[in-house]
Amino acid sequence: MSGSNNFQPVLIGTDLNTYGVARAFHEEYGVISKVFGSQALLMVLDSKICDTTEVDNFSESKVMVDTLIQYAKENPNKKLLLFAAGEHYVFRLFENYEVLKDYYIIPYANPTLGIYLSDKTAFYSECEKYGLNYPSTEVVRKTTYKQYKPKIKFPLVVKPAESADYFSLTFEGKEKAYIVQEMEELSKILELIYSTDYPHNFLVQEYVPGDVSDEYVMNVYSDHQGKVRMMSLGRIVADDPDPELRGNYVGIINPPKSEKVNRLYADVKSFLEKIQFTGLSNFDFKFDVEKNEFKVFEMNLRQGRSSYFSIMAGSNYAKAIIEDIFSEQTGEMTVGNDPFIWTNCSTKGFFQFIKKKDLKLYKELKKIDNVGNTLEYDKDTSIRRNIRIKKYLKKYSSRINKLI
């Protein structure tokens, strides 16, 4: 690929997601990523693979855009690839796409499609149209929530249709998603939510039976022609026991090869190519053990916070992106299938957690050698970083083990 070294990843935000992207590019190409944010969080602090600049008020659109354009003008001879760490930054890119596209390659959906799909009701409408299974869903509106009576049988799942604004809220009793057993409980939750400034719809869904081990996450990259180039599926074995952090993964492993997994890959590939999606995407699924089928919960318009698991599985999205940019040939689609255990805490803390939860699973997982997390990278070491990261992982491990 001629010129394939003439590029520079530029990342906005300084969290775990940012470090995962930087590590993906460093492992594949040895490149150091440029990072901008309001404050350098410990994930990128003292990192040798992240060149981080703190910018006052960087989360404000004008400051962000001015900073990025200035950097681009200072680096006119490289292809600049722009990545966002979180949902709010993805929307900032959508809002300022027409300006930034003249300076950066942005490996996400085009803004019109991206903004449309960010509303889960619109996303489910596309799923209905193109054959991607999802839970039965009803919409609750702020103007009529007091009159709402579900037609779906309890238990139910209650969650925001638009996540970015909801996650920015702080109120007592807040959860990422609520599991509701009866009407009185549902009414109290809707009253709690709509007593805040949250203006968007909420969704009420059927509860898909099964536990966390029936939940899955998928990372995908679709090239500029809308063809899927990379896919990788992970099975969740543990998530955060804190109700407000439900859905934040503690451990992910590779699913065993099966016809149902192959079918899921085929269904997602078909869905993305039919809606002509381009760029990175991330999906959450649950396997409905009663109906023997996967059901999709949501689609994120970026790489997932846990996306490093795909690299552990043998499929690096950084490679797929660079080949898409620099190669004239349409590359073969890669699927990450190598055995792995990705953790969001220390290895010791993870196995302690799993041993308490499921002794049989613990014994099975102890046989896997490919174990790691996003932050501990043997090519990014300094005394201060090592001490800080180990302390962080140990503290996280201690917290989740106390909650179980």
Image: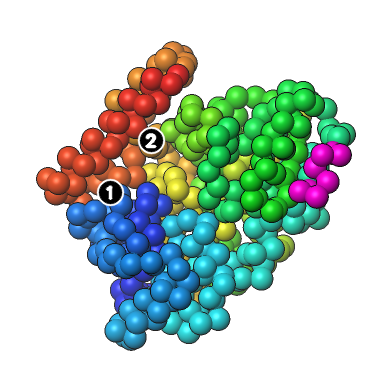
- Reading the image, the residue beneath label 1 is 42
Relative to 346, does residue 355 appear above or below in the rendering?
Answer: above
Specify the farthest residue to the front: 195
Work out how far the residue at label 1 is from the one at label 2, CA to CA, in angstroms: 17 Å
Dot 1 falls on a residue whose secondary structure is loop
Mark number, residue 343: 2
Q: Which residue lies at the image location 55% right of the left edge and 47% below the top edge? A: 169
Span shown in magenta = 141-148
User: Few, some or many C-alpha atoms within 10 Å of disc 2 (few <14, some 14-19, many ≥20)?
Assistant: many
Q: Which residue lies at the image location 25% right of the left edge and 46% below the top edge? A: 377
Amino acid of disc 2: Thr
Q: Is residue 187 left or right of residue 309?
A: right
Q: Is residue 160 left or right of residue 155?
A: left
The percent coordinates of residue 397 (x first, y second) are 34, 28
The percent coordinates of residue 233 (x first, y second) are 53, 43
Q: Is residue 352 left or right of residue 132?
A: left
* Of pointers 1 and 2, the one earlier in the residue sequence: 1
Q: Is residue 63 left or right of residue 206?
A: left
| Residue 285 visible in the snapshot | yes
User: Few, some or many C-alpha atoms within 10 Å of disc 1 (few <14, some 14-19, many ≥20)?
Assistant: some
Specify the farthest residue to the left: 383
Residue 371 in which image quadrant: top left
Prevailing secondary structure class for the magenta stretch in the rendered image: loop
The percent coordinates of residue 314 (x first, y second) are 41, 48
The percent coordinates of residue 245 (x first, y second) are 50, 36
Relative to 314, does residue 364 appear above or below in the rendering?
Answer: above
Amino acid of disc 1: Leu
